[in-house]
């Protein structure tokens, strides 16, 4: 039976299968790309909605009052990660256009992946999910 827990535990494989199916469809019939391109925004909206309905809004105050967690989140996002990205741009200098792309990718957290990777690493995904509104403000 396909339960939410099963899908969450196996979601990496769902992504891999979806990538291969998408590549097969796109490479075998390029005209479908134009047609299926219109489905990207509604599907992304559906995925984001399904993630946001899981946010425990009633427990936000409790989660945000976890000062150790929120402090680590703030230090990581506003001090550690920017310094690491800055050091990487010194080691691997690029043109300004490439650097802007690198900054956008590395400095903007992708909320849904943060939760997925937290869960994959056996972290407290409920606490991270409760911090999602913080990430939305951060973006």
Image (cartoon, rainbow, N blue to C red):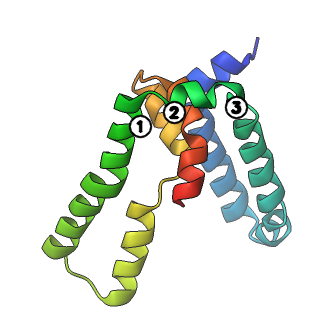
- Sequence-wise, the earlier of marks 3 and 1 is 3
Instruction: Point out residue 66 in the picture as x, y percentages from the top left corner.
Output: 44, 27
- Which of these two is toward me, 15 or 133? 133
Residue 8 in view (yes/no): yes
Indicate left or right for 8 with 72 as reference: right
Q: Residue furthest left?
A: 91
Q: What's the distance in space between the residues labelled 1 and 2, CA to CA?
A: 6 Å
Mark sitting on residue 57: 3
Which residue in the structure is indicated by mark 1?
A: 70
For the residues labelled 2 and 3, the Cα–Cα distance comes to: 11 Å
Circle 2: element type: helix
| Residue 96 left/right relative to 64 | left
Relative image position of residue 35 (x, y in whole percent): 86, 68
Q: Earlier in the sequence, mark 1 or mark 2?
A: 2
Q: Quadrant of residue 95?
A: bottom left
In the depicted view, which residue is nearer to us: 84 or 9?
84
Left/right of residue 37 with respect to residue 65 in the rendered view: right
Across and down, in percent, residue 42 comes to 83, 56
- The answer to whether 57 appears left or right of 82 in the picture is right
The residue that disc 2 covers is 64
Up-down relation of residue 116 to residue 119 (above or below): below
Residue drawn at x 66%, y 24% is 7
The extreme top residue here reads 1
Confirm or deny contact between disc 1 and disc 2 (CB under 8 A): yes
SS under mark 3: helix
Spatial separation of the CA atoms under disc 3 and disc 1: 16 Å
Q: Are marks 2 and 3 in contact (CB under 8 Å)?
A: no
**19 w.r.t. 138: above or below:** above
The crowding category of the residue bearing disc 3, from other C-alpha atoms within 10 Å (few below 14, some 14 to 19, many at least 20), is some
Q: Is residue 132 above or below residue 127?
A: below
Mark 2, other Cα within 10 Å: few <14 / some 14–19 / many ≥20: some
């Amino acid at each position: 039976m396909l339960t939410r827990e099963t899908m969450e535990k196996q979601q990496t494989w769902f992504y891999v299968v979806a990538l291969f199916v998408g590549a097969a469809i796109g490479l075998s019939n390029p005209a479908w790309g134009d047609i299926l391109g219109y489905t990207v925004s509604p599907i992304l909206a559906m995925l984001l909605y399904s993630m946001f309905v899981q946010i425990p809004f009633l427990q936000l105050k409790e989660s945000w009052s976890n000062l150790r967690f929120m402090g680590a989140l703030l230090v990581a996002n506003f001090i550690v990660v920017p310094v690491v990205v800055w050091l990487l741009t010194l080691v691997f200098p690029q043109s300004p256009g490439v650097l802007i792309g690198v900054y956008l990718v590395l400095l903007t957290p992708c909320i849904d992946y943060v939760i997925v990777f937290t869960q994959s690493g056996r972290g407290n995904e409920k606490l991270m999910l409760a911090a999602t509104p913080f990430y939305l403000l951060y973006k």
